[in-house]
Amino acid sequence: MFDIITFGSATQDVFLKSRSFKVRKEKKFFTGKGLCLSLGSKIPVEEIEFLSGGGGTNTAFTFKNQGFKVAYCGMVGEDIIGRQIKEQLKEKGISTDFLFFSKRHHTNYSVILSSPNERTVLAYRGASEDLQKKSIPWEKLKAKWFYLAPLSGRLVKIFEPILRFARKNHIKIAVNPGNSQLSLPQKRLKRLLNFIDVLILNQEEASLATRLPYHKEREIFKTLDEWVEGIVVMTKGPLGVVVSDGNYLYESGVLKAKKVVDRTGCGDAFGSGFVTGLIKRPNDIEYAIQFGSANAVSCLQRFGAKNGLLNRNESIWRFGRVKIKRHPL
Ligand SMILES: Nc1ncnc2c1ncn2[C@@H]1O[C@H](COP(=O)(O)OP(=O)(O)OP(=O)(O)O)[C@@H](O)[C@H]1O
Ligand SMILES: [Mg+2]
């Protein structure tokens, strides 16, 4: 029996840092700003890092670091990177019993272009999305918890089967849904969210799920809280987090990062840290918020999604405490 099985992507992340990456304001870009390079030039890259990423394996690392018995369920390509990911999981002591190799696509691959204060990600979503309902040996999935990192693209097809299986087998479920899941027809989404013990999303995702404007934070949160019987967590980046457990509303800020090196994996670090807190001290939401915040701020201070995650022998209080306001609902 595993303490927790994680689902989601397994990726090779390549970080490139260059002084030649220039930021230009331009309405044509989705965020209003573009990362620009001189067309036709050879651009020098001063720093390069090859690191493992992907929500499924990032969160598995947090749980393993905290001493749990962990398996990752997902798919990689039949290539060198796929084999490296398997080796890395094995070395870490994370079970690869449910790691499969796709013949159809290469392993997921992200190129992360790092410029001061922001990063731009070029994401190839390959083998991870090839995992199908029939490739999973359901009878062997014995766990107390499932953690679902974003199931993007075609992977959305296994969302409902996993939730149904977990419910039938009394496995607790934490879900950090991706855009593909949140874009499901609202009626269906509402029905699925009902199955969940802990729902974690950022404000943008919460707005997408509820189809309410981004700035209507109270309304968005209230709607989700009505839909979900379990705990709802809405993260707001550097502004903190709002949590409801059905009885109380908790509002917290963030821990101060000495230096933000790279925010890749920060959402995974928070979500998996929050669930770790809940497993260690069931029903203690404030402890879960402290745990998630510490794991996230620790992740921010190192390059890569896995390097900065807290270890079991590190105190979660080493970054201080976040102030939490609690109000009855
Ligand atoms: N600059 C920061 N300083 C301290 N803590 C932060 C900062 N940014 C994020 N965090 C912590 O991480 C949590 C999750 O961040 P965020 O809301 O950006 O997640 P996300 O949008 O899901 O991230 P990702 O892009 O990795 O999926 C926040 O609620 C906060 O606790
Ligand atoms: Mg996220």
Image (cartoon, helix red, strand yellow):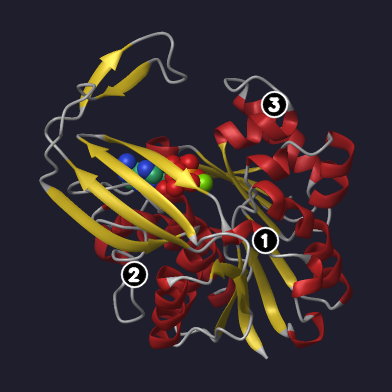
For label 3, the SS is helix
292 displayed left or right of 45:
right
The amino acid on which the numbered mark 2 sits, given as a three-letter code, is Leu
Badge 1 local density, few (<14 within 10 Å), some, or many (20+)? many
241 displayed left or right of 200:
left
Query: Which mark is drawn over residue 298?
Result: none
Q: Which mark lies nearer to you, 1 or 2?
A: 1
Position of 66 relative to 147 (above/below): below
Q: Quadrant of residue 214?
A: top right
- Outermost residue toward the bottom? 1
Label tally: 3
104 displayed left or right of 305:
right
Disc 1/disc 2 C-alpha distance (Å): 31 Å
Position of 142 relative to 307 (above/below): below
Instruction: Indicate which disc, 3 or 2, sits on the residue closer to the N terminus.
Output: 3
Badge 3 local density, few (<14 within 10 Å), some, or many (20+)? some
Badge 2 local density, few (<14 within 10 Å), some, or many (20+)? many
Residue at x-position 68% and y-position 42%: 180
Instruction: Indicate which disc, 1 or 2, sits on the residue closer to the N terminus.
Output: 1
Please give the residue where the numbered disc 1 appears in the rendered image. Answer: 130
Q: Quadrant of the N terminus?
A: bottom right
Residue at x-position 14% and y-position 43%: 45
Position of 87 relative to 108 (above/below): below
- Outermost residue toward the front? 40
Disc 1/disc 3 C-alpha distance (Å): 36 Å
The amino acid on which the numbered mark 1 sits, given as a three-letter code, is Asp
Please give the residue where the numbered disc 2 appears in the rendered image. Answer: 310
Please give the residue where the numbered disc 3 appears in the rendered image. Answer: 219
Disc 3/disc 2 C-alpha distance (Å): 34 Å
Residue at x-position 74% and y-position 56%: 230
Q: Quadrant of residue 61?
A: bottom left
Instruction: Indicate which disc, 1 or 3, sits on the residue closer to the N terminus.
Output: 1
